[in-house]
Image (cartoon, rainbow, N blue to C red):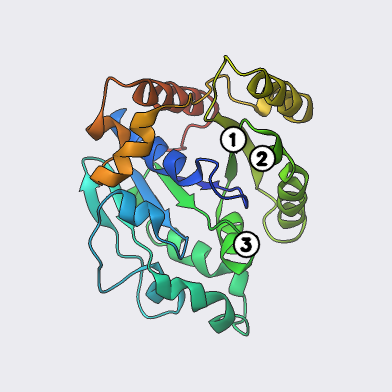
Amino acid sequence: MAVVISLLNHKGGVGKTTSAVNIGAGLAELGRKVLLIDLDPQANLTISLGVPRQKQTIYEALRGEGELSPVNVKPNMDVVISSLDLSGAEMELINEAGREYILRELINQVTDDYEFVIIDCPPSLGLLTLNALTSSKYVLIPLQTEFLAVQGLAKIKQVIDKVKARLNTQLEIGGVIPTMYDSRKVLNREVIETIVKHFGEKVFKTFVRDNIALAEAPAQRKDIFDYQPKSIGATDYLDLCHEILGRIEPKS
């Protein structure tokens, strides 16, 4: 049965989608069967991997017009794509009974086909994000190692705690991923100290270093392992995947 993981941060530009793509790709490189779900109306994950528009997207599935329709993008890795249509889903589903559980019901239909399901959440804390958190066992929080990125952490933890109390008692923080890290910058090191004070062992030992290849890969519609497998970005995400597997292993 698949382990369902949401990548969440309501601040944009912190490496959330980059992490979703490359954690998924890294786990696939390690032989794990992975499903990525693009739950962001901006469809950045879909665009980053160059998946063409499909008739059935996550939007149609959430509206009850069909099941999840995964698209294979590389060995061991499938994607459920998003589209701009998803931006209207929150208003359209507001009166649906059990609206917070729609995604969970969809994922339950495919959970035996994968070892990991990774959800790229939108940069907001609305109904789509609630659906992701209600579906998930773990939340991973990508966090840019800059001062302003730290400011929203309390709000994220508050939302996770409320979902755990009211909607999904299994939910827990799987880890905080420091991104865009530069050890030469005093501020970056100070931010790491701050988040370790708040989250302790939840902070991954692997820091994703600032790396131009990670920024270039989406323009080539590739994950970092297909674009530059010898880059430090590929090294960091593969190390991170090993660390994730050390914490989170799917149950047979």
Q: Which residue is mark 3?
A: 130
Amino acid at circle 3: Leu
- Contact (Cβ within 8 Å) of mark 3 with mark 2: no
Q: Which residue is mark 1?
A: 144
Q: Which residue is mark 2?
A: 149
Residue at left offset 65%, top offset 60%: 125
Horizontal side, residue 246 vs residue 192: left or right = left
- Residue 249 location in percent, x, y? 48, 32
- Contact (Cβ within 8 Å) of mark 1 with mark 2: yes
Q: Earlier in the sequence, mark 3 or mark 2?
A: 3
Quadrant in the picture for the C terminus = top left
SS for dot 2? helix
Horizontal side, residue 235 vs residue 226: left or right = right
Q: Is residue 73 visible?
A: yes
The image quarter containing residue 163 is: bottom right
Residue at left offset 72%, top offset 42%: 153
- Residue 104 location in percent, x, y? 52, 62
Amino acid at circle 2: Ala
